[in-house]
């Protein structure tokens, strides 16, 4: 038996023992485990599952063992992911630390920083948030103005961040700050700090969906120890861009794709009805078919990228990240719009009696999906990235 | 499944070969010479092992597999190369491999691999693809079959030596629902063909079958209710590989123009409205590519297992996505080139014309979306 087949067998046995049966079912948004100091778990099983996976390093399967990761090769990780999908195991942990901060810390952090920050991310003990956008720096992120001054012993930070996902629930922030006002991209640094530091204040923002996944974060005379600068002073932009690539890949692969709830085809059949064996509304049917086909192709693309299909330079990965982000955002928005259209009046409820729970959830998802083409780099910005970096088109004069 | 080093090398070889030996301009040369393809080129394709790519070594082929031959077709599609590669080496060889009897395989495969025997799929009878409405009839008689009917718009129909023809079975004077593929040598008495001059200059023909006497071994393999669809699935996947290549090449041509053409004192490729249009085409092509790769991998993974609903779905998926992508790219190629794009001297028009022919063959994108929807249950 080859090594990889042996690994598959061992993995299968281990998962059989450690993945509780109750976690081999579809997960709703409320059941997501985010970890952190104030972690909440929907069940004891969910806590045990995170603990088992964290101890084995399989929440971060390819990170080195010395930082608590699983130390797996890409091939082994592909097998692990296949086996997890096979038993329909829920992800033990959702984490910006795993998806975004960890990968850049591995690349740009000092040995001490990796030892300090990575293992708690793997075990789900620290919940991270992302201090990127500011009121005056959205698509033009590099114009950010949050000041970070050198005060000898420490840095002193003053400014405001916005669209900080779950800042009110996070333990630590990775944050872009301005350390030099004379140059734009070359005056940005990447720092991290504890959200309990004096001067950090968060305020949730209510969205059209009624949800408040984002916050405003106010930073007033926040003192940050100097060993919490990641990478060189004024060298933050490179790290920022790399992290965005991880964010875009992840948004595409995870966050949109797994929206639980109503199935589009089933809903269409039920609410629109069939005539002579096909959907009664032929125009809607054609649009659903077109959507489903692009959706299936997108899933194939993600799967092929995961298993290292074709060429995999870092430029190719970055290129793919923007394409995937554009496609994933439009597909999820399309799906939500089609679902709403299928539901008709049933899809227009806000809350309360008279509407099914599933329909109410679909309506909230539809509203939330409007953010998909805005967050993590707008579709327009990602098209700019594709045009410039992938297709090699010139900058505007 | 990742691309293996062998496949990577194959792709490099194929791209270089077609770019050097048969650039898009060869379409004009063929047009001037009044031929649908260049026989010397076909011989060279055979020498590279491409014509026997699907065929195992035991039958004289190179056994490169579906993904491998898909990469070759894509490379040929990039330069709009006309040859029997698509019809004979991919579709014809796959049909014989997947459905042929041992005797048919032994007699046909080595000659297909050599390139001396070429096949063409004779399926459509009306301007639209409706194989289930086939009216060409094969009547079972003592010791064989008699074929009557008319096929239209047969790709490579002017040159193929063996016509893989879809016909309805007629037993004891009663037409049945059963459709079956027949191997009809084009030189058989009662077969007449008329060359069609299509916009892309390739070798299409209408073919008449008037009381064509065929042996018992003319029927492909044994009777099976699903094999006729399987051959068309494979044909759609082969076409999609070709279309993917043509679409990528047309986009590359357009990008070159955007990077060299100056107006208002700047490269027109610096205009954001144009950048976003081509960036969206790029995203569409990524999705189309994933669909083709998924379908080719599925063919390789399943060997010659046939009649698989998943394959029906993947075939329609990649035919429609590649068709849509090529449609849009070919229109934008003309538009973004401006005046020069309208002229015969420029390659834009060659891509546009070939695009529509490939999109229409074996079902338009719309046809395949409808099929996909049925398969999905709506």
Image (tube, rainbow, N blue to C red):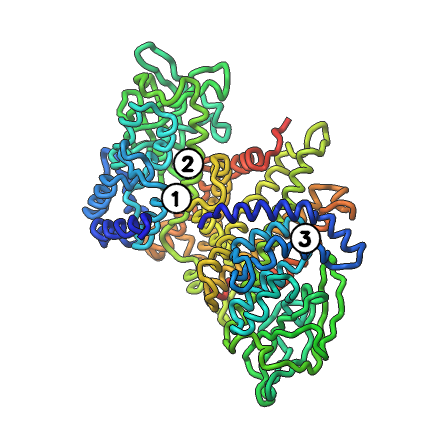
Q: Which residue is drawn at 45% across and 54% down?
A: A340
Q: Residue at x 48, y 43 (%)?
A: A324
**Chain under label 2?**
A
Residue denoted by label 1: A255
Callout 3: SS: loop
**Chain under label 1?**
A
Q: Which residue is drawn at 35% across and 28% down?
A: A105
Q: Are marks 2 and 1 on the same chain?
A: yes
CA gap between label 3 and label 1 equals 43 Å
CA gap between label 3 and label 2 equals 40 Å
Residue denoted by label 3: B81
Q: Residue at x 72, y 79 (%)?
A: B189
Q: Can residue B99 be seen in this view?
A: yes
Point out the tag, 2 or 1, that comes first from the N-terminus: 2
Q: Which of marks 3 and 1 is in front?
A: 3
Up the image or down, B335 lies above or below B323; here it is above
**Depth check, front residue: B289 or B1:** B1
């Amino acid at each position: 038996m080859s090594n990889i087949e042996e690994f598959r067998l061992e993995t299968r046995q281990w998962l059989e023992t450690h993945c509780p049966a109750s976690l081999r079912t579809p997960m709703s948004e409320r059941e997501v485990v985010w970890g952190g100091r104030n972690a909440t778990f929907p069940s004891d099983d969910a806590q045990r599952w995170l603990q088992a996976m964290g101890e084995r390093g399989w929440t971060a399967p390819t990170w080195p063992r010395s930082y608590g990761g699983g130390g797996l090769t890409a091939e082994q990780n592909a097998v692990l992911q296949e086996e997890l999908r096979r038993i329909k195991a829920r992800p033990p942990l959702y984490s910006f630390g795993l998806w975004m901060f960890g990968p850049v810390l591995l690349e740009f952090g000092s040995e001490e920083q990796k030892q300090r920050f990575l293992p708690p991310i793997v075990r789900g003990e620290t919940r991270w948030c992302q201090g990127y956008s500011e009121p005056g720096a959205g698509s033009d992120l590099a114009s950010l103005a949050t000041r970070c001054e050198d005060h000898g012993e420490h840095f002193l930070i003053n400014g405001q961040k916005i669209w900080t996902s779950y800042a009110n629930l996070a333990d630590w922030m990775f944050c872009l700050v301005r350390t030099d006002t004379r140059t734009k991209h070359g005056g940005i640094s990447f720092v991290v700090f504890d959200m309990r530091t004096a001067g950090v204040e968060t305020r949730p923002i209510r969205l059209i969906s009624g949800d408040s996944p984002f916050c405003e974060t106010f930073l007033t005379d926040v003192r940050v120890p100097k060993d919490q600068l990641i990478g060189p002073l004024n060298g933050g932009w490179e790290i920022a861009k790399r992290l965005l690539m991880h964010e875009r890949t992840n948004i595409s692969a995870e966050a949109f794709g797994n929206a639980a709830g109503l199935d589009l085809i089933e809903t269409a059949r039920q609410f629109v009805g069939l005539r002579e064996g096909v959907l009664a509304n032929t125009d809607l049917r054609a649009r659903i078919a077109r959507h489903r086909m692009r959706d299936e192709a997108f899933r194939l693309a993600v799967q092929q990228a995961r298993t290292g299909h074709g060429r995999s330079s870092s430029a190719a990965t970055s290129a793919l990240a923007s394409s995937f982000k554009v496609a994933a955002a439009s597909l999820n928005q399309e799906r939500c719009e089609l679902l709403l259209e299928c539901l008709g009046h049933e899809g227009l409820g806000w809350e309360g009696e008279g509407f099914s729970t599933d329909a109410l959830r679909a309506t909230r998802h539809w509203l939330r999906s409007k953010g998909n083409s805005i967050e993590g780099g707008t579709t327009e910005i990602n098209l700019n990235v594709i045009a410039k970096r992938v297709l090699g088109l010139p900058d505007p004069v | 499944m990742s691309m293996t080093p062998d496949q990577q090398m194959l792709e490099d070889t194929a791209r270089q070969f077609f770019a050097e030996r048969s650039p898009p301009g060869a379409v004009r040369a063929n047009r001037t010479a009044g031929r649908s393809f260049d026989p010397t080129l076909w011989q060279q394709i055979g020498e590279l092992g491409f014509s026997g790519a699907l065929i195992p070594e035991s039958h004289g082929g190179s056994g490169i597999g579906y993904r491998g031959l898909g990469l070759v077709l894509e490379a040929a599609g990039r330069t709009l190369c006309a040859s029997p590669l698509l019809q004979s080496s991919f579709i014809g060889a796959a049909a014989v491999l997947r459905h042929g009897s041992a005797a048919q395989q032994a007699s046909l495969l080595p000659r297909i691999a050599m390139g001396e025997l070429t096949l063409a799929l004779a399926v459509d009878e009306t301007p639209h693809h409706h194989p289930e409405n086939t009216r060409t009839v094969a009547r079972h008689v003592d010791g064989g079959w008699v074929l009557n009917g008319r096929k239209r718009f047969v790709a490579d129909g002017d040159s193929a030596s063996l016509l893989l023809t879809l016909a309805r079975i007629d037993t004891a004077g009663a037409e049945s629902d059963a459709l079956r593929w027949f191997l009809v040598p084009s030189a058989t008495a009662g077969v007449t063909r008329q060359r069609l001059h299509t916009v892309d200059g390739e070798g299409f023909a209408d073919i008449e079958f008037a009381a064509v006497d065929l042996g018992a071994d003319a029927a492909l393999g044994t009777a099976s209710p699903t094999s006729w669809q399987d051959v068309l699935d494979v044909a759609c996947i082969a076409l999609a590989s070709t279309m993917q290549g043509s679409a990528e090449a047309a986009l590359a041509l357009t990008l070159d123009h955007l990077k060299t053409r100056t107006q208002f004192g700047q490269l027109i490729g610096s205009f954001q409205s144009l950048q976003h249009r081509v960036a969206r085409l790029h995203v569409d092509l990524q999705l189309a590519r994933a669909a083709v790769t998924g379908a080719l991998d599925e063919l390789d993974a399943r060997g010659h297992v046939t009649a698989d609903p998943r394959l029906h779905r993947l075939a329609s998926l990649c035919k429609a996505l590649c068709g849509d992508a090529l449609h849009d790219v070919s229109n934008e190629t003309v538009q973004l080139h401006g005046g020069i794009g309208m002229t015969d001297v420029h390659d834009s028009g060659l891509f546009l014309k070939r695009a529509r022919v490939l999109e229409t063959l074996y079902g338009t994108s719309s046809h395949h979306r409808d099929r996909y929807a049925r398969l999905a249950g709506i």
